[in-house]
Amino acid sequence: MQNKRFLLFSLFIAVAMMAASCSKDSDDPQEEKDTGKPEIYLSLPVNGASSNPGDSIEFSVRFVDNKELGGYKIDVHFNDGHEHKSVTNEGKWSFEKSYTFEPGSTDVTLMHDDVRIPTEVDGVPIYAGDYHFLVYCTDKAGNEEFVARNIIIVDLPDETGPVIEISLSPATDQEFTRGDTIRMNGKVADNKRLNNVLVALMRSSSTEEMVNETDAFAIIFNGKEQLNGPSNFSFASSIIFGQAQDNNVPPRDITWARGNFYLIVKASDDSGNITFSEKYPVKLK
C-alpha cells in the first residue's frame, strides 16, 4: 500500500513539474517571436528636394523598434522606371551604404551628410534628373521597413560649347570633279555631353544658320543616331561628288551643281551650346 501511495505521489509531482515548465515557457516574453517592423521617421531629404553635383544631401531621421534595432542602409539611384535596380551607365549615379546601431538601441535620432553627389561617374559628367532616395531599417529579429523619397539633381548651368579638332580636310580651294571623294575627319569634345555633330557641304553664299539637316546643300555626316550622351566623339566622313543621295538621316536627294562651296562642322551639346569649325573652301568642277 505504501509503495502504491509513493508511486501515485511521484506521478503527481512529475505532472506538476511539467505543467509548471509549460506555464513558464508560455509566459516567458523572451521566447515570443518578434514580428514587429521598425519605424522610420525621415525628415530630410524631403520629397522633391533638389541638389547640384558636388553637394552633400542632408540626412535626418529617427528609427524606433519595439525590441532592438539592428542596422540601416541608404540607397540612392537614378529613377528611370526600373524596379529599384541601381544603374551607373552614361553618367547615372548610384550610392549605397550600410550602418549598424549600438547594441540595445530601440530609439535613435541622427543626422549626417555622408551622401555626396559626384560631378562625374566613371569619367562621364553625372546625369541630372530624378533619383530615388531610399532608407531601409532592420531590427535584430530581421524585420525590415523602408521609406522612399524622390529627389532631383539639378545640373549646373553650362555655357561652354564643344571643341572641334579637324584631322583631315581638303586643301584650300581644292578642286573636285564628278566621281571624286570629299573627306573630312576630326574629333569633337564637350565638358559635359554632346548632342550631335554635322559635317555639311555648303554653297559659298550660305550662312552658318543654314548649316542644318534641311538647308545644307549636302550633309556629309549626321551623328544623331551615334551620339547618346558621350563627351568625346571622333568622326570620319566622306561623300562622292555625283552620288544620288547625301548621308543625312534619312538621306536626301542631291542635285549637284558646279561652283564654289565650303565644308564646315557643326557640333552641339545637351545644353544647347553650338560650335562651328572654320570654313574649308572647295570648288566643284
Image (cartoon, helix red, strand yellow):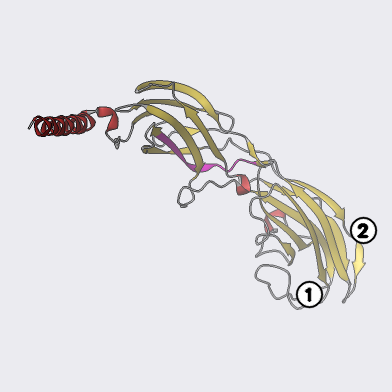
For the C terminus, give its image quadrant: bottom right
Magenta highlight: main SS: strand
Choose between 233 and 55: the one closer to the eye.
55
The x and y percentages for residue 9 are 12, 30
Q: Which residue is mark 2?
A: 171
Specify whether residue 129 is painted magenta.
Answer: yes
The reply to whether residue 44 is visible in this rendering is no
Choose between 223 and 137: the one closer to the eye.
137
Tag 1 secondary structure = loop
Tag 2 secondary structure = loop
The x and y percentages for residue 98 are 50, 32
- How far separated are the C-alphas under marks 1 and 2? 21 Å
Amino acid on which the number 2 mark rests in the picture: Ala
**Quarter of the image holding residue 127?**
top right
Residue occupying image coordinates x 49% and y 28%: 99
Amino acid on which the number 1 mark rests in the picture: Trp
The x and y percentages for residue 191 are 69, 40
Q: Is residue 256 above or below residue 273?
A: below
The reply to whether residue 244 is visible in this rendering is yes
Disc 1 crowd, CA 10 A, few/some/many (<14, 14-19, 20+): some
Specify whether residue 218 is painted magenta.
Answer: no
The x and y percentages for residue 90 are 62, 48
Residue occupying image coordinates x 44% and y 38%: 134
Q: Which residue is mark 1?
A: 256
